[in-house]
Image (tube, rainbow, N blue to C red):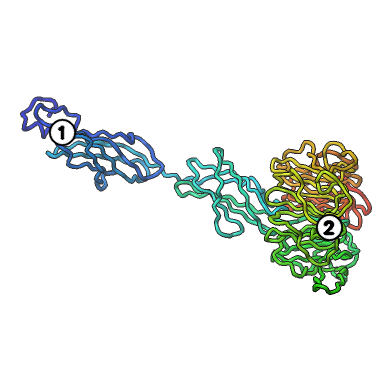
Amino acid sequence: MKCFRPVPALLALWLLAACGSDVASVQGVPAPPSIQVLTPETGASFDEPAVRLSGTVGTAAGLASLTARVDDGDARAATVTETQPGHYTFTVDLVLPPGESVVRLEAEDATGVRDSRTLRLRHTPDTTAPRVQVLSPVANQAFGVRRVSVDARVTDDRRVVSVAYVLNGGEEQTVQAKPDEAGALVFELTPKPGPNALVLRARDAYGNVGESTVAFHFGGLATAGALHSGLLRDGRVHAWGRNNRGQLGLGAAVTADQKQPRLVPGLEGVAAIAFNQNFSVALRSDGTVWTWGENADGQLGLGTPPAPGEPHTPDVTLRREPSRVPGLEGAVAVALGYRHALVLMEDGTVRAFGNNADGQLGDGTLESRDYPVTVQGLTDVVKVVGGSQHSAALKADGTVWVWGRNSYGNLGSGSADTAGHPAPVRVPELEHVVDLANGRDHLLALHADGSVSAWGLDASGQLGAGAPSVGDQSATPVKVKGLTDARAVFANGNFSFAVRVDGTLVSWGQNGNGQLCVGDKTDRAEPTPVATEVNPVATMGMGATHVLALRQDGSLYGWGWNLNGSLGSEAVIDRWSYTNPIAVPVP
């Protein structure tokens, strides 16, 4: 049978139905329905199983039905709209199984004549999870600021629809920031004192989940005082060096100096430590604060506040083992000046105790306290640091506030004076600060762009501006020369350090005891690369004349002045300066 042979009119309808709508109509006999699929094209591929077909149907006899079926499955009726007599538009929603499918559309007019069209469509399910990389923090990195910036890269072969994180096994939190076109993502979170575990998750439109996990620490892990040193490992404190004032915390039976690390007994669950001069402090994960060592100025904070109008006898007795500071709960960070202590609380306020000759306690007086007092007017603080007789705080808004001694322009306000300043004042025009450190009488502020500002005493080039400042001090912040990629800053005495983004160290300032770790004893007035053995650095411990560096792999190094066992190794010479790193054997 040939479709185009002239035939009687009665036979024409049957022939048209058999041959489909491509068959020419016979005069006087209505043409069969004509289906045209507008979208999608045959051969199209889809990520998702749901597909909508749309098109037109033309039939002079009137359209009775239009159905679609996938791979000879059940027929599904299309939604049809007559736009003008004999002309129809349609849509039909289908669900494709994975792989290639044959979709058949079939139209029937009012006389029973039919037409059909077939398409081949492919559903390719997305089974590839997004790729998640946490670039910062790096594994085992330690932070001194209670505000951690997470730098990540989140990519997918198709599309990421959401990113969330879980911190320390808590509830999943949605990240409000969105990855840019390259997948870069930056957001902030608030860590708990001690070890933290971050899980970052990304989901695509098809339910696939990719994740990355990193462990980091908030709080001091390595620390040093005048001649004693400490390391926090697995919640236990190891101490060594000079012990003449009980600063090692080894108890009344152990008063001798220690040339190797010793475990401080009776102190567990520690989240952070800080040593300075001849006293020590530990913050436990339960938010309590413990102190020991020298106490001549009440810097251990173990006294009891007097009743109003009652006489007060300060507690100035040294302690050879850790004692809990009464009345302090909910602490999240600790810092020590030379003879005073600072405690950051969960609510962003600050407590202080100890020597207050220059107002470094910030309570509006110049009276020393052997018990914690509240620093006036400070809220939203994310880090505190203590100098010789000044204190400083970094707030969440990136501003820096200083109080106490201003003899060398410590306040950064543009002028120096010998008066005490017992209330915090903001360092003018200093913004976007993300980390803070100080030495004896100089301060460092790390900016979000990786640059560092410094001010205060500059007798040894510790401000790092390239040459000592006029009068050996600067009462206004100056930029550290050539430093644009710092991620953390550290200081003590008259010298300074910065950790760069790649984990390498640079140092500047006083170097008479080799404390800059550059292989000589020459002072530096601008950042100088440190010996490579200590890289990459997780955190630092800054003593008055010696330094500790904790690597990301957990190994510990020390350098500078070794006296009374301050460097923690029996292999080194007592009363000797070491200009290169010495491995510290910690159990």
Q: Is residue 237 visible?
A: no
**Cα–Cα span, label 2 and label 1:** 98 Å
Q: Position of residue 586 (x, y in %)?
A: 79, 58
Which is nearer the N-term, disc 2 or disc 1?
A: 1
Q: Which amino acid type is shown beneath numbered disc 2?
A: Gly
Task: Say what secondary structure mark 1 lies in.
Answer: loop
Q: Is residue 127 visible?
A: yes
Mark 1, other Cα within 10 Å: few <14 / some 14–19 / many ≥20? some
Pointer 1: what residue?
A: 60
Query: Which quadrant of the figure contains the C terminus?
Result: bottom right
- Disc 2 on helix, strand or loop? loop
Pick whichever, 310 or 283, lies toward us.
Answer: 310
* Relative image position of residue 32 (x, y in whole percent): 16, 33
The image's mark for residue 359 is 2
Quarter occupied by the N terminus: top left
Q: Which mark is residue 136?
A: none
As rendered, which of 314 and 139 lies closer to the eye? 314
